[in-house]
Amino acid sequence: MLKHGNANSKRVIVNSLRGKVIKLVSHSVAAPMFEIIYSKWATSSERNLLQQEFFGDMYKHEKESDVVRLEDALNMPAMKGAVLSAVKANIVRILDKKLAKSSLLHSVLLDFLKFCSKEDREEVCQQIQECLLDFIGTKNGAQIVVRCICQATNKSKKSIMKSLKGHVMEIAKSEYGHLVLLSLFDTVDDTVLLKKLLMPELLCDLVGLANNEYGKKVLLYLVAHRDHLYFHPSDIAILKEGVALSNSKKDMNVRITEIKEVVLNPLLEAIANDPKGWMSSSSIEMVTLAVLKSGNGNEAKKAFEAIAEYVCDLNVKIVENGKEINIMEHPGTHMMLKKLILHDKEKAAEERVTFSSVLVSKLSTEILSSWIKCNRGCFVFSFSFGNFIEFSDARCFGETSQFDKSNQDRNFSWSKNPFQ
């Protein structure tokens, strides 16, 4: 009837739910059907009216058009205690029956956690911890879990991480669920236990995670914590709000550094072993860039060498929208290389190996002849060689430049003007 009926029939069906919302949402058979009607077929104003029934019996038959959220129902100080008490009773009733997969429940519950007492918040959060996976399907639900995690004790966080075992990859690839993992990275003091319980599942398929729209955010958060280049301000605001409620004692920078250590080298190793996979699209190149910018030491050098050899291969093509594009002419690759080369200034200042030095060491006359025939190739060469000249001193490369050393056997020589 909802699928094929006319507009009037749909309104009749939705309106027939009035006065029975709590009964239906807390019924094992009716709850899934109610969720479909509420989320898919009810209009915004109808959803507001149905939501009011969580606020007490007085809203079962008498609706108020100006009451949109719980905050509106709390405007009358004399009614605040009664409303919060009714909301809590209805929430607990539904949670007791393990029927937490309700977008209506998530919307009301998120508001309730903002206005309830500390004791009520702790009680409800304790129940939520027993069914966390039921909340990650909606944005409000994910925010609820973030709040519960941030306010949980260290013992409770341990239980939460254990309950997620076996579902970590599923959560990481969830549109909203990935925020739950990010909140754990932000607030868990026992990073040793976190690395033991959660990281093995993430590390088992790094390419699959990096290619996923939401999974890549988990990797980016680990190597480029809250960088505005990769994260929307609204997501950062949710995480910051959660951290503000946290009772964690460990310094945030120390925590993130400890967690990054376990994932950075495997990522660099994965890039070194499969540069083609990590340069196959603009989306995954964003992750590759963040990893290479964070990398250091021998593993970073190996990854730089693999990427440099790959982009210097004149036969490499990237297939996009059914068309083959030379890798040096691909806009995503060009942007990634440009940003990586520009980041060399920071690496050189810290006396770390730079991508420019590695890339220049792989160049030959044939490669340059190809690159200078395309606009993007010229820019990559200009940026990389300019960096090489600027940073090629005894501190970074020794008295003899790596470029000279690596090209002695190639019968390759520069004129006084390297761009001639």
Image (cartoon, rainbow, N blue to C red):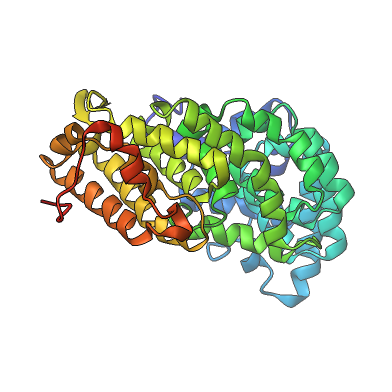
Q: Indicate whether 24 appears above or below 180.
A: above
Q: Position of residue 164 (x, y in %)?
A: 74, 34
Farthest-out residue, bottom:
77
Please state which of residues 353 and 259 is positioned toward the viewer in this rendering.
Answer: 353
Q: Quadrant of residue 72?
A: bottom right
The image shows a total of numbered marks equal to 0
**Quarter-wise, where is residue 308 in the image?**
top left
User: Residue shown at 81%/35% (left/top)?
Assistant: 162
Q: Is residue 174 visible?
A: no
Query: Quick check: 282 left or right of 72?
Result: left
Residue at x-position 76% and y-position 61%: 246
Residue 66 can be seen in this image: yes
Q: Is residue 89 left or right of residue 43?
A: right
Looking at the image, residue 282 lies above or below residue 385: above
Q: Is residue 394 left or right of residue 206?
A: left
**Whole-percent x, y for residue 160 in the image:** 80, 41
Q: How far from the left and from the top, in percent, is residue 135?
A: 67, 40
User: Which percent across, then down, holds residue 82?
Assistant: 80, 64
Vertical comparison of 355 with 394: above or below:
above
- Residue at 74% x, 55% y is 187
Q: Nearer the viewer, residue 280 or 90?
A: 280
Residue 375 versus residue 393: which sits nearer the camera? Answer: 393
Q: Residue at point 55% right, 59% down?
A: 236
